[in-house]
Structure formats: C-alpha cells, structure tokens
C-alpha cells in the first residue's frame, strides 16, 4: 500500500486530526497574543521589566517540550484535560517571539514621530494606540508568524499527553515502526506550517508601514 | 501725573505687549548633574517672534522644550500666559502650543489629511469644521488640496513634508508656535523658499513664535528678537538691527560670518 492510497483510505481520520491540530494551535496562539502583546508593550515602556519578562519567557522556551507537558499534568484544572495542558504549553512556547517583536516594534518607532506626538498634546494612551501600535503591527506580526510555525510543529508532541492532533499518527507510526503512519501526521503538519507562514506573511506585508 | 500712570499701565495691558512666555531664572540639569541651561531670563510678548541662536548642544532646544513641558525646569520657572508650566495638565498646555521639529515627525501611517486633522479630531471638532480647516491650512502653506490630501508622508518631498508639519502644528489654531530647527533638513534653495513663505505666514497670523536655529541668516530674517545662547546661558538679546553691531564675542563671531558672505556678494 503506497502513501497516496493510505491517505485516500484514511482521509477522514487525517482531516479530523488536522482540525484538532488547527484548534490546538489556534487557541494557543490567541492566548499567546492576548498575553504576549501587552507584555511586549510593558517591556517597551518599562525597560527594567525587560529582564524578568523576556528572561522568564526565555526559560520557558528552554524547557524540553515533552517535559513541559509532563510538568503541567499535576497543575489543578489544567491537568484535568489533555487539551488544556497542550494549549497552555504551546502558548508558553509562543510567548517569547511575540513579546520580543512587540517590544522591538514599539521601541523601533522613530523618535521624531514620538516627540511630535507628545509635543502636540497626545496622551500616552493615544500615542500607544494611534501611533506606536499601528506602526509596530508588521514587526509584531512577524513575531506571531514565527511563533505560529513553531507551535504547529511542537503541537505534534501534544499527542504524547493525549491531546490529539496530527501527532497521534506520528506517535502511532513510531510505535509500530510504520513510516506511512508517521508521514500521515508529518506531511499535513508541514503543510499547515507552510500555509500559516504564507498567510501571515501576506498580512505582514500588507501592514508594513509606508516608508520612504 | 496720575493720568500718565494710567496711560502707561493701560498700554501695558494692550495685547501687543503682554508677555506670553516668560523664563525666570530657568535652568535645566540632566540627571547626571550636567547643566544644559542656566539662569535663563527672557520674555516673549504676544505676536512676537523670538529666535534662539546658538551652536548645536548650546541649550536652545532645551529652552524650547521647557515651554511646552516636554522638559520641566530644575530651577526657576517658565510661565506661559502667566502660569507656571508645571502647574496644571501638560496635555492641555501642549494642545495650545504648536510644535514643529526638524525631522518633522509626520505620522508615516497617516495621510496628509489625517496628519493635519489629528489634533482637531482628538479635540472632537465636527467633521465639517475639520474639512474646512484642513483645506484652509493646506492653502495657507501652499499645497494643492486635491493633489496632496491623500498622500502619505513618504510620497512627499522634504519641503512638502515641512509644510505639512507646519500645517499640522497650526491645526487647532494655537496662539503659540514653537519651532526646533524647522528648516534644518532642507536643501539651501528649498530652505530659502520655505523661509520666505514662513515670513509671509508669520505676518498674516501674528502668532507668538519661538524658533530655534543655528543659522544666523534665518535668525536675522525671521526674528523680531534674537537671543544668542552659548554653553547653556543666554549671552545676548538683540533686535536684528542691534545684532549686527553687537560686541559680545559669541555674537560677534556670528556677525563676522554674515559679513564674510556680504563681502562675497560685493559692494552695492
């Protein structure tokens, strides 16, 4: 049985697993953006917070993913369901590029632009919302893009704690020494990563602030 | 006698002679203790243009930033319309003071229209009034409305950007205008052009203006008074006419520079 036949025969399961995968990654990314962007803003505005916040996110990044899933098992509420553990761990991994790029985008805003905004009587909040954030969108999105591609890959490991997704095929394939099974998980995961990268890349270019 | 006193005090309250900006022993130090400005005493009256002339780093921009509270004086006070700048809300203060900086600082993600109308929008002007105001300002700075309204800053030349910057600063019709090297980034010909236009604008608007520059010709062209600042201190205050006869060494260096160019042009 060649690979194409395998895909044809199991397309339902593969589609099901792909949807689970997208769900895991999607929710984790929403969570990571919701937490990471405000943290990035904080880092940009209060440089003394950069070390603890970026450092913390950095440490999370260095924990081997399999171990991180394990560490979260005994956490109350989170540990009750495998998807929760997976989403929390994935969001934690996605944080660093988002925080870093948000902060870089904001600190990268031309000083003259910030000075002009302040000098004309905009409040700090208005400067952030109307000037700094819009001008950082493309940098921020570049971070989200990197984080998403990373997360699509790491999410395959979520199957190890039973969270589902395309990792199911990979782990089953590994256990059964069946390459077709492994590829049934790996190929859609790679495609997902490529698609996410492409779509977010398009958005990033669209949002690029006009420059001379 | 009493009539005369009344007359003079009456004249003192005429709008033309009212101090709008006043520095009283104002100084500013960096956190590391280095003084950027020391014991500055200056009065700018309504409708007057004061030019602060000096080398880069002499403290001119610092003086300017004390007026709209971008910086707060460490010593002395700076009064705007009789009130210390550090009393009250800095946002409120800045909204009544137009501010133009050398790099212009137009918002790159906003069109010309959005740049100019930002402050009126923040102040919740009705749309109709904003539209009229933007058209009026573009005309005032000599830019064709149909052509420029929807352009982005990167689609403008340096001179055009500068004009939009001035229009933006004037948007909410502030009585005071601060300009920090406003024409500094322009090539000499465009600079001369924009300076002349600005002179014309100045005559029509009669705003109270403080300009910071290191160009002596600009100071002579635009200033009713010229304050020479050197190493953080005011070393002389002149009318353009007195300026050329000044003997104070820093000022004399500037006038020597002007005379050198006059000589190049030859007699007559």
Image (cartoon, rainbow, N blue to C red):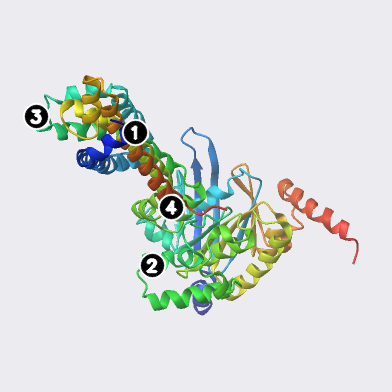
Q: Earlier in the sequence, mark 1 or mark 4?
A: 1
Q: Chain of mark 4?
A: A
Pointer 4 residue:
A207
Q: Nearer the viewer, residue B175 or A116?
A: A116
Q: Judging from the image, what secondary structure is the residue with disc 2 in?
A: helix
What residue do we see at 59% from left, 65% from top? B163
Q: Nearer the viewer, mark 3 or mark 1?
A: 1
**Callout 3: chain:** A
Label 1 and label 4 in one chain:
yes
Question: Are marks 3 and 1 in one subunit?
Answer: yes
Dot 2 alpha-carbon crowd within 10 angstroms: few under 14, some 14 to 19, many 20 or more: some
Give the residue at mark 2: B121
- Looking at the image, which is closer to me, A130 or A71? A71
For mark 4, give the secondary structure.
Answer: helix
Left or right: B263 with respect to A147? right
SS label for mark 3: loop
Q: Nearer the viewer, mark 1 or mark 4?
A: 1
Callout 2 touching callout 1 (CB < 8 Å)? no
Residue A1 can be seen, yes or no: yes
Q: Position of residue B239 (x, y in %)?
A: 68, 62
- Local crowd size for mark 4, using a 10 Å CA cut-off: few (<14), some (14–19), many (≥20): some
Instruction: Using the rendered image, report if marks 2 and 3 lie on a common chain.
Output: no
Cα separation between marks 3 and 1: 27 Å
Read off the residue under disc 1.
Answer: A150
Work out whether mark 4 precedes mark 3 in sequence or the reverse, and give the earlier one: 3
Q: Nearer the viewer, residue B125 or B81?
A: B125
Q: What is the chain letter for disc 2?
A: B
Marks 4/2: CA distance? 23 Å
């Amino acid at each position: 049985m060649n690979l194409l036949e395998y895909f044809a025969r199991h397309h339902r399961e593969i589609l099901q697993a792909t949807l689970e995968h997208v769900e895991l990654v999607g929710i984790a990314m929403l969570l990571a953006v919701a937490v990471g962007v405000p943290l990035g803003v904080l880092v940009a505005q209060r440089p003394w917070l950069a070390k603890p916040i970026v450092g913390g996110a950095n440490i999370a990044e260095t924990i081997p993913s399999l171990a991180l899933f394990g560490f979260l098992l005994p956490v109350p509420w989170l540990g009750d369901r495998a998807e929760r553990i997976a989403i929390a761990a994935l969001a934690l991994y996605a944080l660093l590029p988002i925080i870093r790029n948000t902060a870089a985008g904001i600190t990268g805003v031309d000083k003259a632009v910030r000075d002009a905004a302040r000098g004309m009587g905009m409040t700090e909040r208005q400067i952030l919302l109307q000037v700094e954030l819009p001008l950082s969108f493309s940098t921020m999105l570049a971070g989200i893009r990197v984080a998403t591609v990373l997360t699509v890959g790491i999410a395959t490991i979520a199957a190890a704690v039973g969270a589902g997704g395309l990792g199911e095929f990979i782990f089953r394939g590994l256990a059964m020494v069946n390459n077709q099974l492994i590829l049934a998980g790996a190929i859609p995961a790679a495609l997902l990563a490529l698609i996410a990268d492409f779509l977010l890349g398009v958005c990033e270019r669209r949002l690029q602030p006009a420059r001379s | 006698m009493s009539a005369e006193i009344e007359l003079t005090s009456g004249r003192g309250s005429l709008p033309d002679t009212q101090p709008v900006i006043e520095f009283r022993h104002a100084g500013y130090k960096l956190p590391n203790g280095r003084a950027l400005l020391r014991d500055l005493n200056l009065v700018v009256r309504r409708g007057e243009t004061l030019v602060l002339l000096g080398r880069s780093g002499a403290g001119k921009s610092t003086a300017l930033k004390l007026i709209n509270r971008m910086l707060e004086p460490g010593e002395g006070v700076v009064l705007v319309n009789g009130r210390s700048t550090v009393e009250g809300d800095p946002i409120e203060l800045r909204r009544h003071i137009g501010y133009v900086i050398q790099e212009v600082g137009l918002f790159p993600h906003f069109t010309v229209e959005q740049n100019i109308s930002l402050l009126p929008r923040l102040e919740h002007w009705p749309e109709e009034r904003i539209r009229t105001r933007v058209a009026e300002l573009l005309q005032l700075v000599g830019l064709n409305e149909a052509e420029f309204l929807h352009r982005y800053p990167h689609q403008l030349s340096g001179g055009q950007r500068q004009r939009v910057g001035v229009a933006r600063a004037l948007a909410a019709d502030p009585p005071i205008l601060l300009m920090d090297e406003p024409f500094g980034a322009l090539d000499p010909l465009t600079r001369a052009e924009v300076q002349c236009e600005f002179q014309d604008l100045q005559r029509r608007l009669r705003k109270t203006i403080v300009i910071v520059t290191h160009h002596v010709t600009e100071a002579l062209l635009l200033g009713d008074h010229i304050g020479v600042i050197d190493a953080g201190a005011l070393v002389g205050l002149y009318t353009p006419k007195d300026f050329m006869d000044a003997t104070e060494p820093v000022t004399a260096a500037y006038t020597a520079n002007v005379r050198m160019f006059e000589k190049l042009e030859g007699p007559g």
